[in-house]
Image: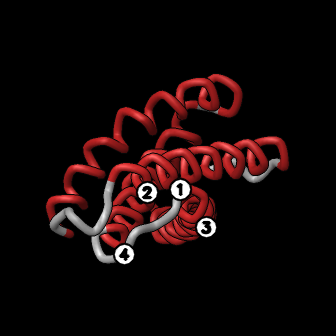
Amino acid sequence: METRPYFLVGDLVANVVAGAAIGAITAAIFGPGWNMWIAMFVAMFLAMPISMFIAFPFGALFGAMEVMVPVMTTGMVVSMWVSMEGAMVRIPVAEGARMGVYGGIGTLIACYVANELIRRRTSHWIS
């Protein structure tokens, strides 16, 4: 993954936008009337195309693979988190968006850490 500031900021903005959008949408759709497990699976499938549409314009600016993996992961994580919590207690849309922002930042950090650990373990194979 890139470490230059332009790409770091682009990854951060893409994940924050994806997280906020998906968090708000899932908070608006899922409420206490939903079964938690069904809400999670429906939200995951709903988040996939939304993540794709968000990742496409950012991918053109910051690199398709650099953006696609973290944004798709953000969509899955945030949709599961917000929908499952929303199945327990009503979440306002603004709160869902805030949860999405936090989820997007956390997922991006996790992707960068995982990438660094994987590269360290495989560097002797490819050099």
| 78 and 67: which is toward the camera | 78
Q: Earlier in the sequence, mark 4 or mark 3?
A: 4
Q: Are marks 2 and 4 in contact (CB under 8 Å)?
A: no
Image coordinates for residue 14, horizontal then vertical, percent? 64, 43
Measured in 3D between alpha carbons, the distance from the residue under mark 1 to the one under mark 2, in whole angstroms, is 5 Å
Relative vertical location of residue 33 with respect to residue 47 in this rendering, above or below: below
Q: Residue at x 64, y 52 (%)?
A: 16
Q: Are marks 1 and 2 in contact (CB under 8 Å)?
A: yes
Relative vertical location of residue 9 with respect to residue 51 in this rendering, above or below: below
Q: Amino acid at mark 1?
A: Val
Q: Amino acid at mark 3?
A: Tyr
Image coordinates for residue 118, horizontal then vertical, percent? 47, 66
The residue tagged 3 is 102
Quadrant containing the C terminus in the rendered view: bottom right
Q: Residue at x 50, y 67 (%)?
A: 114
The residue tagged 1 is 93
Q: Amino acid at mark 4?
A: Val
Query: In the structure shown, which secondary structural element does the residue marked by tag 1 occupy?
Result: helix
Measured in 3D between alpha carbons, the distance from the residue under mark 4 to the one under mark 3, in whole angstroms, is 19 Å
Asked if residue 77 can be seen in this view, the reply is: yes
Which numbered disc covers residue 89?
Answer: 4
Say left or right for 20 vs 43.
Answer: right
Measured in 3D between alpha carbons, the distance from the residue under mark 2 to the one under mark 3, in whole angstroms, is 14 Å
Q: Are marks 4 and 3 in contact (CB under 8 Å)?
A: no
The residue tagged 2 is 27
